[in-house]
């Protein structure tokens, strides 16, 4: 399933542009320049009204019946879209509870969808914004064991990818740029590779100039069925998680320039914290 994520909110971008125009229209403060408007990517907390709307849509989709040939009622596709929306903001504990309750009710009403709905519930609990990313442990493509948690203290880009996937390949130039830009920074790029064998994966990465470490997990009939994929409740490739230096999920499925900005943003946060600690600020 080759899919792309929704962009960081257009509404937020409009507000950013308006604030920039407003700032330019104001004369400098008599005592000096004020800080320029922020250009950071921002993940905002969900409002209750937004959760109401998402749950209403979810229930309408479930009530419409199941027809995998129709994108409007394909349950797997719609649950993937639902999860992507939930990974595009910050859920409060109460809001998460509401989502899980609706998933449980739907599972009772539609037992034929119980496995898919339980997968969705696991994802809400474990791979939404603000959660510590689930541990991954296993051999890399050269047979050397390593863990995701080995990289605490660094910003981590974790990508589920494979050379067989056209959209994944379109991200390679950005991955090479990140490798070069931040080779001396506390940043690491890791992947879960889904090519047909470790040898195929290793050869493809070398030919593409990609030198980051990878776990390997073969996909089955285009499905994300391996243990790592199940842990992350993966729906399709590519999927990208950006983790801060404490292993917390901060962004999901950013692409291209947005991804570059977010990596820089998290590294800047680390640098500011370090300076603050050194100065006692």
Image (cartoon, grey):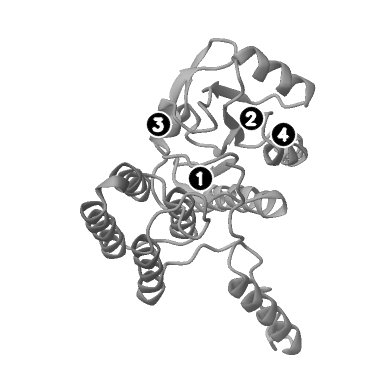
Name the front one of labels 4 and 3.
Answer: 3
Vertical arrangement, residue 263 with respect to residue 49, above or below: above
Q: Which residue is mark 4?
A: 179
State the residue at coordinates (72%, 89%).
26
Secondary structure, mark 4, is helix
Secondary structure, mark 3, is loop
Vertical arrangement, residue 148 with respect to residue 45, above or below: above
Name the front one of labels 2 and 4.
Answer: 2
Query: Which is nearer the N-term, disc 3 or disc 2?
Result: 3
Q: Which residue is mark 3?
A: 135
Q: Is residue 240 visible?
A: yes
Q: CA distance from mark 2 to mark 4?
A: 18 Å
Name the front one of labels 1 and 3.
Answer: 3
Label 4 with label 3: CB-CB less than 8 Å = no
State the residue at coordinates (49%, 56%).
81
Numbered badge on residue 244? 1
Query: Which is nearer the N-term, disc 4 or disc 3?
Result: 3
User: Residue 5 location in percent, x, y?
Assistant: 58, 54
Numbered badge on residue 162? 2
Query: Which is nearer the N-term, disc 2 or disc 4?
Result: 2
């Amino acid at each position: 399933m080759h899919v792309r994520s929704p962009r960081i909110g257009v509404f937020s971008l409009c507000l950013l542009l308006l604030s920039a125009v407003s700032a330019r229209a104001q004369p400098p403060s008599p005592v000096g320049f004020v800080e320029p408007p922020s250009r950071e990517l921002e993940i905002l907390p969900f409002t209750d009204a937004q959760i109401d709307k998402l749950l209403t849509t979810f229930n309408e989709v479930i009530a419409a019946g199941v027809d995998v040939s129709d994108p409007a009622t394909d349950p797997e596709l719609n649950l993937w879209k639902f999860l992507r929306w939930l990974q595009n903001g910050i859920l409060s504990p109460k809001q998460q509870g509401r989502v899980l309750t609706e998933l449980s009710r739907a599972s009772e009403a539609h037992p034929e969808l119980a496995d898919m709905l339980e997968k969705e519930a696991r994802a809400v609990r474990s791979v939404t914004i603000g959660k510590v990313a689930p541990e991954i442990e296993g051999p890399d493509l050269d047979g050397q064991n390593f863990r995701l948690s080995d990289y605490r203290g660094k910003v981590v880009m974790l990508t589920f990818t494979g050379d067989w996937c056209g959209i994944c390949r379109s991200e390679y130039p950005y991955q090479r740029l990140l490798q070069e830009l931040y080779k001396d920074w506390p940043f690491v790029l890791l992947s879960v590779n889904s090519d047909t064998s470790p040898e195929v994966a290793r050869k493809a990465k070398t030919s593409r100039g990609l030198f980051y470490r990878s776990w390997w997990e073969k996909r089955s009939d285009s499905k994300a069925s391996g243990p790592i994929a199940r842990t992350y409740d993966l729906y399709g490739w590519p999927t990208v998680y950006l983790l801060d230096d404490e292993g917390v999920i901060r962004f999901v499925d950013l692409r291209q320039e947005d991804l570059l900005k977010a990596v820089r943003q998290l590294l800047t946060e680390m640098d500011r914290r370090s300076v603050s600690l050194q100065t006692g600020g």
